């Protein structure tokens, strides 16, 4: 059952295969956090959601097991002060992985809520 009113399954599906994993409790919790962020920040443009392991190995250096392969990671197209506000909100809502690319044409923020290793963490691309 899809309960996230501001997101469609199509925008979260793998761009390479058109697939999305079954909704597990962990994915539902991630989506709840994402919906909470959307409710407070306004529109969010997702440029990358779920990635099948095969697709992820083609487009990312994280191979077949990167954060996007869990269904609990997204990249959001955003820039400027809106990016700063999104990072603040992401920490407040429990996102534990925040990647920032804010130079060049492709500006985005990566968000995930994975556990393991040193978390929360923030990095730049």
Image (cartoon, grey):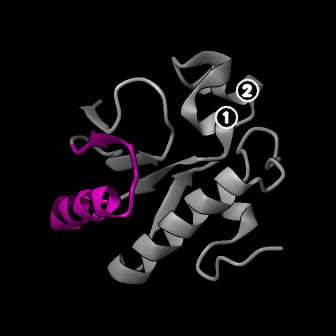
Relative to 80, residue 42 above or below = below
Disc 2, SS: helix
Q: Quick check: is 51 in the magenta stretch?
A: no
The residue at the point 25 percent across, 32 percent down is 124
Look at the image and say whether residue 94 sits in the magenta stretch: yes
Q: Please name the residue shown 64% across and 83% down the image.
A: 5
Q: Which class describes the residues within 10 Å of circle 1: few (<14), some (14-19), or many (20+)?
A: many
Q: Magenta region: which residues?
A: 78-102
Quadrant in which the C terminus appears: top left
Residue 19 lies left or right of residue 87; in this view the side is right
> Residue 15: horizontal and vertical position, in percent?
70, 45
For this view, does 92 lie left or right of residue 3? Answer: left
Q: Residues within 10 Å of mark 2 (few under 14, many from 20)?
A: some
Residue at mark 2 to residue at mark 1: CA–CA distance: 6 Å
Residue at x 43% of width, y 82% of height:
39
The residue indicated by pointer 2 is 53
Find disc 1 in the rendering and name its residue.
69
């Amino acid at each position: 059952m899809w309960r996230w009113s501001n997101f469609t399954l199509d925008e979260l599906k793998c761009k390479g295969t058109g697939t999305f994993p079954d909704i597990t409790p962990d994915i539902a919790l991630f989506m709840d956090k994402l919906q909470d962020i959307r409710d407070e920040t306004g529109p969010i443009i997702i440029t990358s959601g779920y990635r099948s392991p095969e697709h992820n190995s083609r487009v990312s250096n994280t191979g077949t097991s990167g954060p996007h392969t869990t269904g609990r990671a997204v990249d959001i197209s955003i820039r400027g002060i809106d990016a700063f506000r999104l990072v603040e909100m992401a920490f407040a809502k429990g996102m534990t992985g925040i990647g920032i690319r804010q130079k060049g044409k492709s500006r985005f923020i990566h968000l995930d809520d994975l556990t393991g290793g040193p978390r929360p963490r923030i990095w730049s691309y």
